[in-house]
Image (cartoon, helix red, strand yellow):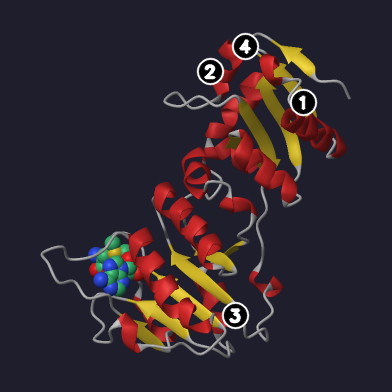
């Protein structure tokens, strides 16, 4: 299908795309917004389903844009050639992007994880609330080469605009699993490797532990920390020493340090 030229920010398609900055609309449609050509190309290269591609009409002859349009058509999506006014409406205000993609969300179930694969490692996040933390953790999981993130109970939306920005395109390469606390506890019962919790109260320094594979690394909520329930199923709880006056580390920083410390010895 030929690209559709849209010049009015009040066009109904543009309004629909803009509405994806609301969690309710993302839930109803199963879609999410990706800003910037680099992240859109990342999604294409990893086979994500592209429903809309919107780009500035001045860039229509660029090879990358032509590739996006053809990929979008193959996904049954719609390519939109737009002007500055329209891009301003659907793009971020501080650093407007000239390409916006709308992709299908993908959530996985715990039953899809092969528990017998001893090379695997997953990061379990309990009620993570800050989308910037979640996006940074997804990017770090990608960087370190871990296998996915498991979101327990009510977490912030991994497909919010803030979270997607923080992932810098890694959202497409890190599978996102969701489960309730009870589902997770019963699924983890026959986990054959270590299930490592992180708590300020533990007396075990993170550098003392070499985990048995496959690994589940559990991180707690920004305010409440890791619940008693999850501490209860941990094979070990580790702590990052707090040597100054700060009483804890930011969740995404703590996750990054633990991931590199625990996974690097396996490489
Ligand atoms: N007030 C919370 C508590 O008592 O646990 C602080 C939560 S902390 C901001 C968020 C999460 O980051 C914690 O649940 C834990 O997973 C991890 N974390 C932060 N600092 C840590 C540390 N020094 N040792 C181990 N884990 C830490």
Left or right of 195? Residue 3 is: right
Q: Which mark's residue is nearer the viewer, 3 or 1?
A: 1
Camera sees residue 229? no
- Note whether ligand 1 is within 8 Å of mark 3: no
Ligand 1, image quadrant it occupies: bottom left
The image quadrant that residue 34 belongs to is: top right
Disc number for residue 10 = 4
Which of pointers 1 and 2 lies earlier in the amino acid sequence? 1
Seen from the viewer's position, the closer of residues 112 and 53 is 53
Task: Tell me where residue 96 appears, x and y as whole percent.
Answer: 50, 24
Q: Is residue 90 above or below residue 221?
A: above
Left or right of 83? Residue 195 is: left
Task: Tell me where residue 218 appears, x and y as whole percent.
Answer: 43, 73
Pointer 3 local density, CA inside 10 Å: few below 14, some 14–19, many at least 20: some
C-alpha distance separating marks 2 and 3: 45 Å
Q: Is residue 135 above or below residue 208?
A: above
Disc number for residue 88 = 2
**Residue that badge 1 annotates:** 79
| Secondary structure beneath label 1 | strand
Disc number for residue 202 = none
**Residue that badge 3 annotates:** 187
Which of pointers 2 and 3 lies earlier in the amino acid sequence? 2
């Amino acid at each position: 299908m030929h690209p559709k030229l849209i010049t009015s920010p009040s066009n109904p398609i543009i309004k629909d795309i803009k509405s994806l900055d609301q969690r309710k609309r993302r839930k109803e449609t199963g879609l999410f917004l990706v800003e910037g050509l680099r992240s859109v190309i990342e999604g294409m290269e990893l086979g994500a389903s592209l429903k809309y591609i919107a780009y500035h009409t001045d860039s229509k002859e660029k090879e990358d844009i032509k590739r996006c349009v053809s990929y979008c058509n193959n996904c049954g999506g719609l390519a939109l050639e737009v002007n500055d006014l329209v891009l301003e409406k659907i793009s971020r205000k501080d650093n407007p992007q000239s390409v916006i993609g709308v992709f299908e969300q993908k959530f996985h179930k715990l039953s899809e994880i092969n528990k017998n694969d001893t090379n695997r490692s997953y990061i379990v996040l309990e009620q993570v609330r800050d989308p910037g933390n979640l996006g940074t953790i997804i990017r770090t999981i990608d960087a370190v080469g871990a296998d996915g993130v498991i979101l327990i109970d009510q977490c912030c939306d991994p497909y919010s605009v803030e979270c997607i920005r923080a992932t810098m395109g890694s959202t497409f390469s890190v599978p996102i699993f969701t489960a309730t606390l009870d589902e997770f506890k019963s699924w983890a019962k026959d986990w054959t490797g270590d299930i490592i919790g992180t708590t300020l109260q533990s007396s075990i320094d993170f550098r003392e532990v070499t985990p048995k594979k496959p690994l589940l690394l559990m991180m707690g909520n920004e305010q409440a920390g890791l619940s008693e329930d999850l501490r209860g199923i941990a094979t070990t709880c580790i702590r990052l020493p707090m040597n100054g006056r700060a009483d804890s580390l930011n969740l995404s920083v703590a996750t990054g340090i633990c991931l590199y410390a625990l996974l690097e010895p396996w490489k």
